[in-house]
Amino acid sequence: MKKWITRKLNKNNAVAISQRYDLPMLIAMLLDIRGISDEASIIDYLSNETLTASPFEIKDMDNAVERIQSAIEDGERICVYGDFDADGVTATALLYSYLSDIGANAMYYIPSREKEGYGLNKGAVGRLYEQGVSLIVTVDNGVAAVDEVDYANSLGIDTVITDHHAVPDVLPDAVAVIDLHRPDCNSSFKELSGVGVAFKLVQAIEGEYADVEGLLENYSDLAAIGTVGDIVSLRGENRVLVKNGLRHINNGDRLGIAALIEDAGLSGKQLSAGNLSFTLVPRINAGGRLGLSKKSVTMLLTDDEEYAADIAAELSKDNTERQRIEREILSDIDDMIREEPSIVNNRIIVVYGDGWHKGVIGIVASRIKEVYAKPAIVISLDGDICRASGRSVSGFSLIDAVFSCEDLLDQCGGHPMAVGFGIRRENIELFIERINAYAEQHPIPVPTLQLDCKLNPAQLNVDLARGLSLMEPYGADNPTPLFGLFNMTLKDIREMGGGKHLRLTLSRGNSTVYALRFSTTLAEFPYQPGDIVDLAVTLDINHYNNSESLSVVVRDMRFSGLDEDKIISSKELFERFCRGDLISPAEARSLIPDRQEFAVAYRFLRSNKGFRYSFDALMYRLDSNIGYGKLRVILECMNELGLIQIFEGMYDFEIKMCEVGGKVDLNTSVIIKKLREVSADE
């Protein structure tokens, strides 16, 4: 369960913004809520199309430009050394395309995720030396490649590093190390992705008076895909790149991107940053995960329409295969959790399995994080050195947590929200223990759902949704506005799309709202007509037969009136007890149910012949004051004693009743005995 929080609003400030800039009141409110309230930031957010800072404020940029220009003038062979994800692929395509256009003797290299792993490696450096390369320019990698750069230096190869990842204590001995996170870098905007840094390098090579509009026209489509794909902040210069990029993408200026759009079935539609994130980026990433990164670059650069279509089809096929592999790994993990539910009680969830595809485990970690609202790490067992990928929740630096176990690791890189590392098989259990001990000393924030504001259902209309276009493009740090509709009565539930989606009818007062709940079947939906619910929704406009209608999309739902703080606190206490953490006698007593509470829960389950849907729904349907932790104890006790069977995986929760031959003694339950032992320790 996430805690729903409505962001703070200064109404007087919002009114002033609305009047001064002639903006709809809702837009003015959203600007204030998101901290965009002074004149400079409002104008930059709403109106800036081309303004970017001087690239020469970035540390080492002058050194990089001097070395690259020297290589171009002398006809040296330059290799753009990229990465296999969408950010690295687009950064490679952008810089290689530019260097080729200005007459450089350039090539590019993308390492194999499976065979070489992330970043610069000595084997690749050796092969590039044999091909006559005398200058390597990395994009989206290299800031930690100390040994690899030393090796390149020993061969007489110079290196220019351009990266945006966390900076280690020791930098590579390169001609230039361009990373905005260097402590000695005075750049005004720090949130560029790898492709954004590559764009700044191109801008710098063009000189102090570069034609930025021309560069945006030529390369912002690539920059937009990489920027959205790397989930960096869509503020400042990133917003400029994505705004321009979307315009050129929608104009069909680049054959490779047009082919991807065609294959995704989006031709003729105006693409948003969300479309890039959910359609184009996964296809490019799938190439990197399953071996087609180099072809992805070629596709983005080609002038051959047929070739572009062929590669786009291959990437789409790879994406489908990636989804199948992802489902298989998630199924394995679901089985693990059913077999050993204690896995998800840990502060940081760590799972591992033989032969899991290394290119997919990052996505799987993200899925686990979304379900349990906890940091998650997935490890693929393969030989002595195993590969791991992790994803974090907002407010908890997973890279710091992983670095606290650095002595157990073979290699590590990443940033607060995502990490990748190698680990010896024999160190995994100790790693799990150590990283969870770190999380005990560095508490993980309570998961939250941030609502921009509450809306009165009577206010909902097409004009309200149309005004929101001023806030686009949406992405990290500028999410699609999320609105709260509270105390709504659910009137009707209808299936759509062959039963894959639902259409809900809700009301409050004299207002009726029709809303869509996607990717949810009737069998999975825990609500029923008559329930009073709160909804977190986004608003859009549906275009059909030359007419417009309001589209209200449900992103999350909950039963109205639940005490979130109490539930979250009780859940945390139960998990602490299950982990064997120290809890006080008073806390133990608060988890011990009395016979009446057992009876209430058992009678409900028996009268309903069990239960399915979700644990939160069970709490609500019981209509009692039994808290989260106490109800969990009741169910564990009943399960122990053979009264019920609990089937709980990542996505489902079901209780089945068992045949009982006679009376059972609740006092014989192991979980009750343990709680009573702790409660007596005073």
Image (cartoon, helix red, strand yellow):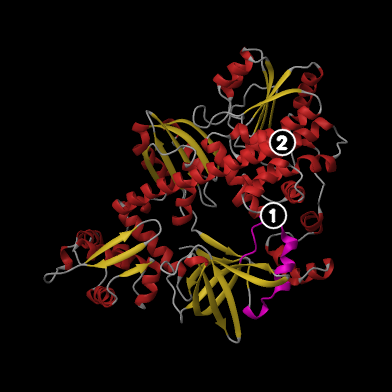
Q: Quadrant of the C terminus?
A: bottom left
Image-quadrant location for residue 308: top right
Tell which of 592 and 129 is nearer to you.
129
Q: Locate residue 667 relative to residue 493 in the image: left or right.
A: left
> Which element type, helix, strand or loop, lies under badge 1?
loop
**Is residue 609 visible in this depiction of the protein?**
yes
Residue 480 in magenta stretch:
yes
Whether pointer 1 and pointer 2 mark residues with C-beta atoms closer than 8 Å, the reply is no
Q: Among all residues in the image, which is located at the extreme bottom?
A: 510
State the image coordinates of residue 481 (x, y, percent, origin top left): 65, 63
Residue range (magenta): 457-482
Q: Position of residue 157 (x, y in %)?
A: 66, 16
Q: Quadrant of residue 469?
A: bottom right
Q: Residue at x 71, y 21 (%)?
A: 78
Residue drawn at (40%, 45%), measured in percent from left and top?
Answer: 350
- Image mark for residue 271: 1
Q: Residues within 10 Å of mark 2 (few under 14, many from 20)?
A: few
Mark 1 or 2, which is nearer the eye?
A: 2
